Image (cartoon, rainbow, N blue to C red):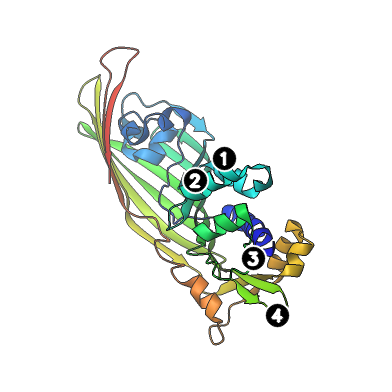
Amino acid sequence: MQPKMIARAVLPFVLLAAALPASAQIPVSARASGIGASYIGLARGVDALFFNPANLALGNNPGWSFAIPVSIGASTSGLVVKDFRDVIDSDKLTDAEKAAIVNKVPGTGVKGELIAWPSIALQLGHLAFGVTGGIQGDQFLGKDLVDLAINGYQDNRYDYAVGNTVGTRSQFLDAAVAYSRNISKFSVGATGHYYMGRSLARSKLFEPRYNVQAGDINVDYVEVFSGGGNGYGLDIGAAIQASSKLTLSGAVANVITKMSWDEDLSVRQVSLTKATFDNFDIKVINDDLKASETKLDPSNVSLEAYDAALGLYDEAYFPSRMRLGAALTPWSTGRITAGYES
């Protein structure tokens, strides 16, 4: 039953060590989360710092505002969150329930994504500033890995494939300052960002190696990561209150931007064997993974570390994003909004 134990041991890693290239970049308030991209026409106070700095100079902007928004989002394809819990605790499932979960998984595997944005921001008149922390990730799981976790190892089968079981993780801070002023009937504004990368990682689970004679198995889990980075960005925006009831607003985030990550990489690696799972302890495995950390020597890179590092820097930056929106207040208690983002 070793492969089943392997899958159970690996799943906490691939679910918790998930990551995503930096792209969302807007921690939103409860009000904004219900409206989405079309909120740009309504954003005032600290929300304007994240949606459009030009809104800070509109007539109905508050004198001051303060917020500590925390945005957390997650999504999965192929399986839902409950299915993942059932995979990890599959001993409680009937055979029919196990088969139903495996049948849900497409041949290409499943994907999960996670975004978390804790922030703090303050707005005083036409000026706003804030600090945002970002944690983003995505993770792919091969179908056979889900099968092993649920049904265990089928005797005399040596063709299991973990598939495209890879993940990325990024953590960073964004310190932003925005200012806006009126020019004729319009308001214009700009936000400057300083980005400080905390970590950028890519992990991969490699195919099992079987030792039939010894009755043992080895599965290597490898993570390659950069320990820091820095960059900058500039947002520009414009807005107009065409009337007391209509606001038109537009902005381009990161119209100028740069993000560089440290190329002095580190690597962690743990090999999971039969002995590991006979005395399974997730804390011990995690401690072994941390203890294995070494600097990656460019002149002596293993094939597994090289493979795990491929694509590490892909899309590891803040992209330019255009936002357009309108907000109409036809009556005192109602709002009509529209928005476009690309």
Q: Which residue is mark 2?
A: 79
- Foreground label between 3 and 1: 3
- Please state which amino acid type lies under the numbered disc 2: Leu
* Visible residue check, residue 168: no
Badge 4 vs badge 3, beta-carbon distance below 8 Å: no
Q: Can you give x and y, in whole percent of width and height, for residue 6 in the image?
A: 66, 62
- Please, what secondary structure does the residue beneath circle 1 have? helix
Query: Nearer the observer, disc 4 or disc 3?
Result: 3
Instruction: Judge the density around disc 1: few (<14), some (14-19), many (≥20) Cα neighbours within 10 Å.
Output: few
Residue 8 lies left or right of residue 171; in this view the side is right
Q: Residues within 10 Å of mark 4 (few under 14, many from 20)?
A: few
Q: Is residue 123 above or below residue 282?
A: above
Tell me: residue 4, above or below residue 59. below
Quick one: 70 or 269, which is closer to the camera? Answer: 269
Q: Residues within 10 Å of mark 2 (few under 14, many from 20)?
A: some
Q: In the picture provided, is 204 more to the left or to the right than 178?
A: right
Residue 59 image offset from top left, x and y in percent: 31, 25
Horizontal relation, residue 171 to residue 251: left or right: right
For the residue pair 205 and 2, the one nearer the viewer reads as 2
Identify the secondary structure beneath mark 3.
loop
Q: Which mark is residue 82?
A: 1
Single out the mark in the foreground, 3 or 2: 3
Give the residue displayed 50% in from the left and 57% down from the top: 143
Left or right, residue 93 beside residue 64: right
> Which element is circle 2 on?
loop
Name the residue carrying label 3: 155
Residue type at mark 4: give it: Gln
